[in-house]
Structure formats: structure tokens, C-alpha cells
Amino acid sequence: PSHTSGIDRPAGSIVSPPEIAHQILDGTADFYRSLSHLYDWDGLVSGGTFEAKEVVTIMPGMGMVANSFLPLKNSMPYPARADSAGVDRTGPGAGAFSAWHDQTYKTEVDLVAGAELFVDYGESYFTKERGLAGVPFLEDFEWADRVIPDLVRAGVALVGDTAWWAIKDALVENIRRLAALPTLAADLVWAGQVGSIENFLGGNNPRSLDWLATNGYCVDNLDVRRSNLPDAGRGAFARKAFAMDDVLLPLPLLQLRRRDLATGENGGSANQLLLNYCFGDADSSMVLFPYSSTSNFINHSAEHSNARLQWPESDPTNFHQDGWLAESVEDILSQKHAGLMLHVVATRDILEGEEVTINYGKTWEDAWKKHLQEWSPPAGNGPGEYVSAGDLNASESRLKTVFEQTADNYPENVATVCYYRYDREEEEEATKIWNSRQRTEETLEVDGDRALRPGFDSAVYLARLNRTLPIILQHAPAWRKDQFRQLSGVNVRPCKVILRHSAEEEGAGDRYLVRMYNRWNQQDHSSIPTDQVEHYLAEVPRHAIHFVDRPYTSDQHLKGAFRHEMGLPDDIFPVQWRDDYKSCELLS
């Protein structure tokens, strides 16, 4: 499938409903070899990289449906936010749902209605192992645009396809450049007129709205809010009224082997939290993860559900492979792509603003009741002990400096990070070395009380710090909330707040002097040479500094947190998907 905009959108527009983000923490080798490797993102993109030593993120909606075509990338992910949606960690729902939400995407350029939304998977994604080694990059199309006019002038468009294919093979060995050229000789003239990228896409971008209405689904029928159900976190709500039997949402499904969702040695629970968002059956080793927009927010209600799951009666996208319903689990798990889809269908009329729920099944409900009986709150929840990073981000509009924290520290489970784009080659030219000479014992050291006094000069403070390393001081760019490129998750790094002062502009809030550090997984080009300098940034706004939970401390890591897949109704679960199907067949 693909993701297409149904309206005109200026650059900087949000292009999808706020989505959930699933952090896969220290996943098993089998998980990374599963079909998920086609869909997972680096934990940096969602903001979850500090949850564990190794983090990848599954981001349903745009993160799994939108394609990546690097020459026309037009949408950028914006980091998720983490909070508990009002569920206290002493309650049985703690750790049972992803706290990471509000994952959004924004357009990088102006888009017209019908334009396909393309995200950036990175060049490293397009490998031979994924069958994508022949997808051209921008430089390949630029090369094609240079050579195509010469080929047309030479009359190659008239030679016939067999001769053209031989010419292409002789002309270039690079498989990406071969793909950037037209497949048919007769298309050379058109490609020369409209460009090789337009030719590669077949003239199908943008699509007409009539075409989309006939060949696609509307995936913004549901909105995300705090659920009306206890311990459920967030829920999905109807954005308009629906009649009985209306399709509310299509659910493309990613097939996974149940055992691949086991956690690593540091896991608080036996299974990754992703299991709670999968459909399955207790007697089957396969689970199915739904990945359309807002689908992961649909909660359970046994008595008052207003929607059901069913296999599509028709699928305008031709994504659903109905024949797979007759295949075995091993046959489906061996497929190199997803190919199953469910529909969420209204079982009665649904009002605008009403929460949409389905029935997860008796097995799931029995497991939840057992969890309620056995649940005991974790230790360490007294005053001043655990406070989630999400709660602090919501409540702490003014950040404490390192000096203030000596008397009134933040809880041990949190740390501060800063969104700061640093490129070593670019930044070295813009830096100012405040003190590059070796310091002596006579260098003055500034105490915390003096640093907190009004009018304190941070430059003087830095120059007098008793250090042996040089100091780099830079002034932050004019960071505004609409500068989402600066606030991309790939730019996050640990930091410490050194000083605070009020901004000169009225109503602009506090500004901070921050010391920057590197992540443990920092790339070379963005790594501050901390063995040579201490790196400080002045005039940093509050919204560029966030609290994060330290690794292995958030609710997702709680021992005994609820883990269970959602049940598929017996009347639509194929019997051959049960692990004992062959033995039952022999007995019969």
C-alpha cells in the first residue's frame, strides 16, 4: 500500500493522525530476521533510543504504510511524546500499553491533493537483501536526465526494445542507473520531456481524487483521545457518524512468529509490549500486527463493543491475499512481504465522537482478569522516588540548573536530553574557543550560589571554570517550535542544564546554557570530540530540552506487566493456522 494526501498541504503541515510508537527493546536475533526488518526504524526517530541499550521502533500508520522514494521525499517524522495517559504505575494497566504517542509527520515541501507521501528510509535501507538494490537514488536520475537527450538525438528511441536493452547493458553496469532509464525505447522521448523521475513513476503522481476514491481507503476516520475505559490509556474515537456495517478502518497485517517477540535478558516481561497490539490465537504460533493509522488505539469491550473484525469482502487496493487464508502458518511466515488485511466494521450505528471498541475475546479477557488478581504495584513509588519523564515534561516549565539540583535533585530515573543538530565539519568553523590553554591551580572556580545571581555572565563563568580541556561556546540558532527539522529525533543527545535566565523578548520564556554530550550510539559526523573540548550551547529554549526515562526504568520494563495478544474471533480464524492442525487432521 501507499499513503496519499487527499488535500493540498503547505510545507510544515501535519499529514497523518497522531500515532503510537512501539519501542522494541533489546530484541532477539530472530525478531531482527523477521519481516519486521522491512518496517522498523531506529529508536532515535521516535525519541525512544534511551529506553534500552538497543532500541528499534515500530511506527504504524505513516511509518509502515508510506513508501520511501528518496528523490521525492516530502514528509518527515516528528518524535513521539511519552506519558502514561493518566494510568498510574501502581495500577494494573501500568506497562500494558505504549506510553509513546503523538508520533506525527510533517511535510517538507508544499503538496497538492493526490500527491503520494514519501518518507526517508535512508540509503542504507535499499539493499540487495531487501530486494531493493535496483531502486535509483537522486544522483541516478540526474545522470539519466543528462544522457537521455543524447540518446533521443541519436535515434535510440526508434531502435526497438530488444536493441535498447542491449544498449542499456552496454552503456552502464550500475543497476540503479539502469533502473533510472526507461524500460521501453519508445518512452525515451517522453522521459526526456517530463524527466526520468516522472517516467519512473509512470505519470501516476499525483493521483486524481476520483482515482483515490475508487482505489483507496480513507484512513483518518478515527481520532485519538484519552479512553473512557479504566486502565486503557488512549482510545480511538469516530470523527464522523457511521451506519451499521460501514467499514471504519482497513487493517493491513504484518505476520510475525510469536516467539520472535520474546524480550532480551534485560526484559521485565517475557514478551515485547508489541504482543499486546497483535491479533492471534492461543493455539497458534503466528500473530498478526495491524499497522494502519489509529488502529492500535482501538480498545476492548466485551459487552458494549460497537465494531467487529472481518476479512474483506472486497479490497480496492488489491493488497489482501485471500488465498493466504487457506495456507499454513509456515507458508505465511515464509512470505517476504505482508499480504493480509482485516476490516473494522460497525456493528451498529456509531455517533460522531463515540469511542470505537471491539471484543478481544474470552481468552484475552480471562488473562486480564487473572492479571488483576495477581498484580502488585512495584516498589519505589514513594514521594521523591519514581516520576515518569512524561509527567516531568508536562509539569516542569522551568528547569533546574545543576547547581539547584545539588539541593533539590530530580528523581534518579530521569535525565535531560537536548535536540541539537551538530555536524563536526560544519560546526568547527562556527565555534569560538574561549580558553584553549592549559589551566593552572590559580584558575578561579565559580561556585553555584554566585552562578545563580541575576546578571551573571555565562561567558566569564565558562572562561574561569577549572578545567583542563578547551571550551566551545555557541549560541543556539533561533529555535522556534515550527523548526521541526532541528527538533528531529536524530538530533537528540544527553545534556546538562548549567544556567538559566529570562529571554530578552517578552513572553519568550527562559533560556538555558546547556552542556552537550554524545549518545553511546552517536555517529561519527555528529559526535562532539569530547576528548578535546567541552561543548556548551547558550540561549537554548525550554522546548528543545526534554526529560527522558533512563534505560530500563519506564513502565514498559515493569516485571509482571500485562502481556497477551488480542483474540481473533473463532468464526474468522482459519483452523489450519492452529499449531495442532495436522495432528487433528490425522486423528479425524
Image (cartoon, rainbow, N blue to C red):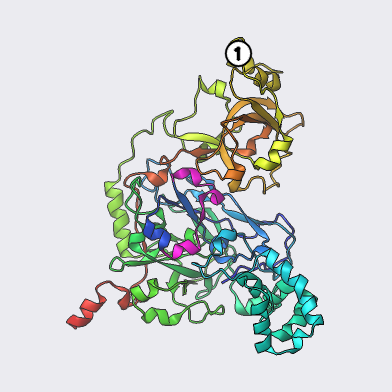
Q: Nearer the viewer, residue 92 or 183?
A: 183
Which residue occupies the extreme front position in the image?
170
Quadrant (top left/top right/bottom left/bottom right) for the N terminus: bottom right
Give the residue at x 44% y 66%. Answer: 35
Q: Nearer the viewer, residue 230 or 112?
A: 112
Give the residue at x 29% y 73%. Answer: 578
| 559 horizontally vs 166: left or right | left
Say if 504 sits above or below 407 in the image.
Answer: below
Q: Is residue 296 visible?
A: yes
| 144 horizontally vs 330: left or right | right
| 541 horizontally vs 311: left or right | right
Which residue occupies the extreme right position in the image?
153
Counting from the top left corner in percent of width and height, residue 477 is at: 72, 38
Residue 35 located within the stretch drawn in magenta:
yes
| 57 horizontally vs 184: left or right | left
Q: How many badges with numbers are in the image?
A: 1
Say if 157 sits above or below 504 in the image.
Answer: below
Quadrant (top left/top right/bottom left/bottom right) for the C terminus: bottom left
Counting from the top left corner in percent of width and height, residue 21 is at: 50, 54
Packing grade of label 1 (10 A; few <14, some 14-19, many >=20) is few
Numbered range of the magenta stretch: 34-53
Residue located beneath label 1 in the image: 440
Q: Nearer the viewer, residue 396 or 173?
A: 173
Residue 501 located within the stretch drawn in magenta:
no
